[in-house]
Image (cartoon, helix red, strand yellow):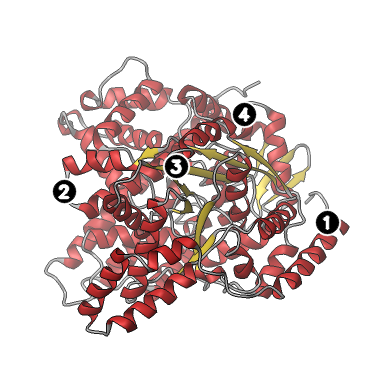
Amino acid sequence: MSSRPRRGPTRLARAGLTRAATAFEGFRARNEPVPDSPLITDLRDSPRFQEGVRGLAQQLDRPYAEVYEEASADLRGMSSTHDQTITAYWDRLGKWMLRGFDLIVDEDSLAHLRNLDRDHSLVFLISHKSYLDEWIVPPTVMRFGLQPPFGLAGANLDFFPLGTIARRTGIVHIRRATGDLPIYKFALRSFMGQLVSHHANLIWSIEGGRSRTGKLRPPRFGLLRYVVDGVDRVRSDEVYLVPVSIVYDQLPKREVALMTAEARGQGKTPENVSWFVGYLRGLARRLGRVYLDFGEPLPLRARLDELRAEDDASRTVVERVAVEMCHRINMATPVTPTAIVCIALLGADRALTLDEIVETVHPMAEYLRQRNWKTAGGANLHDRATLRHALRDLVDTGVLESYTGSTTVWGIVPGEELTAAIYRNTAVHVLVNRAITEIVLSDFAQAEDSQISTDRGWSFALALRELLKFDFFFSSRPDFAIELQHELGLIDPTGVPVDELTPAHARGFLDAARPLVAHLVLRPFIEGYWIVATQLAHEGGRTVDGGQAFVAECLKLGHQWVMQRRVASAESISGEVFASGIRLAAHRGLIVTDADPDGLAERRADFLAEIAAVQRLVAEIGAHAESARALAPTPG
C-alpha cells in the first residue's frame, strides 16, 4: 500500500495552540457574568412579558414573584453581547482553527442580503456540518457589512472558556430539551420575539445539531415556531429566512471519528475543556476548502399568509416552512469533487482505477451540467486531474488507500465506509429524484402489459417519496410530478408522460440512461430500512419502543449481514440510518409499546416485503449499470 506520509502538528500549529491557551487565560480574568443587554432589560420590564408571567403563574399554580424571578434568571442566561475586543480575539482564534481550509464564499448572494439587512431581520438557517461552522458564518456575514447576528447554540458548548467568550460574541446558549421546563420555554419564546421585534439578525442550525451523516437531518421546529410567534405578535417589517449551505471538502479527523462512532452505536462524547484542546490539536492538517453558499431568502410573513390561506393548522404551517427551508438549503448546496469520487467508490464497493472512476463520474458530471447544478468552486468534474487530486487528498487523511502495481487503484480503507458516506451524502440530494425515476422504470420494465394501469408509475413514485421522506426533502406533490417528468426527459427527450409508460418504454429508457444512480444514492438507506423491517418482523406482534435496545439489535443484525454479504456495504450499518427507518415504521403504526393491536405481525411482514421489493429493484439497477459500464468506451 502506498500513500502520502502523515505529518504531525506543525511548528505554526503548536505556536497557535499556545497563543489560544494564553488568550483563554486572559479571558479567565474577565470571567464576570455578561451584563443584561438592553434587549433583556426592556423585555423583562415590559407589560407584555409581565402579563405573560402572570398567566403562567396561574397556570402552574405558583406565586407570581417566584415565576417572574425564575423567568428573569433564564433570560439572564440568554444575555449576549457583541464585544468588539473579544470578538476580534474570537475571530483570530477562528482564523487559526481554519488554517487548514480555504473559504469560498457566495459573495453575490451576500450583496443581495446586505440590501435586505437595511430594513429587515434576517434569520440564517444553516446546515450544520462541523463545530467550525461557528467561526465561519457569523464572521463572514459581518465582514460583508451585515449587522452582527445573534447565534443560538446548544448549552453543551457553554463551558469555560469557550462559553464565556462566545457569549460576548453574540452567541446565545440554549437548552435543547425544554419539554418539562414551561418557564424556560416561556422565557425563550419571549426572548426570540424581542429579537425579531428589534430587527435583530439570528442564526442557528435548522437541524438542531451537527449532521452525523453529511446530509441534512430532519428540521427542529421549536425555535422557528418562536420566531413565527414573534412575527404574529409584532407587526414589524418583513422577516426573511435565509437558507445557508456549508460544505467541507473534508472534516477534521477527530470530528469525523466521533460522528462515525455515534453512528455505530457509541454514546456521544461530552464537550469540555480537554475535549476542546484535543479538537484544536487535530486541526493542523490541510483539509481543502469550505464552501459557504446562500439560497433564496423566504419572506416569512408573506409565506405564512399564503400557507394559512390553504391550511389553518398553525403547527402544520411551521413544519411546512421548515421543510421548505431545508429544501432551499439543499438547492443551494454545490457538489464537491470529494463527494463525487466517494459516490463512485461506495457504489462499486471495491478498488477502482482512475479510468473506472472517470467512467462512473463522467455521466454524473454531464447530468449535473444538464441540471445546471453548481459544482463547488466551479470544479470541472470531467477533469481527470481534479478527480485525482480529490483521491489523493482522501488518501492523505486515511479515508482511502492506494496501491500501484501495473496501474494505480484506489479503495476505501476498511472501517472508513461511514466516513466516505458522510462526504458522499453532501451530494445525494441532487440525485434522489433521478434515483426514484430509475426505480419506477425498473418496476415497469419487469411488469406484464396486463399489470399496467394508467397511474401505476405515478402511484409508485409517490410511494417511494413517502418511503424516503424521513431521510430526504421533497417538493410539493405538483412540483414533484414536474420534476419527475423532467428526469424522464433527460433520459429520453421523446417526452413520454409518467402515466403513459409501458414496459417497453421502461426497458428502453433504462438501456439508454446515463448515469444510473439509484444503487449509488439510495442503496445504503434502503438496506438500512430493510434491516429495521427485518428486525421488526422478527418481533412478530410483540411491543417494540424503537429505542436504544432495538437499535442495538439492528446493529447486530446489520454486522451479521455485512459478513454474510447480504448487504452491499458496511455504510448501511448506521444508527442514523436506522433512526430514519424507525421513524418510518412508527409513522406506519408499527412501533407500539402498549397492547398488541390486531394484525400487527402481518403489517410488519407486509412492511418488510415492501422494503425488500424496493431493495431488489435497486440491486438490479446496480447490476444493469455494472454490465453497461463493462460495454461502454472509456471517456477521453
Cα distance in 3D space between marks 4 and 1: 29 Å
Residue occupied by mark 1? 7
The kind of residue tagged 1 is: Arg
Left or right of 423? Residue 331 is: left
Q: Residue furthest top?
A: 494
Q: Looking at the picture, does residue 546 appear above or below residue 475?
A: below
The kind of residue tagged 4 is: Gly
Q: Is label 3 or label 4 in front?
A: 3
Q: Secondary structure at mark 4?
A: helix
Q: Which numbered dot is residue 242?
A: 3
The kind of residue tagged 2 is: Asp
Residue occupied by mark 2? 312
Mark 3 Cα within 10 Å, few/some/many (few <14, many 20+)? many
Cα distance in 3D space between marks 4 and 2: 43 Å
Q: Looking at the picture, does residue 198 appear above or below residue 69?
A: above
Residue 29 visible (yes or no): yes
Cα distance in 3D space between marks 2 and 1: 59 Å
Given contact means CB atoms under 8 Å apart, are the residues at marks 4 and 2 in contact?
Answer: no
Q: Which numbered dot is residue 378?
A: 4
Front one among 211 and 357: 211
Q: Secondary structure at mark 1?
A: loop
Q: Residue furthest left?
A: 598
Q: Position of residue 545 (x, y in %)?
A: 29, 73
Given contact means CB atoms under 8 Å apart, are the residues at marks 2 and 1 in contact?
Answer: no
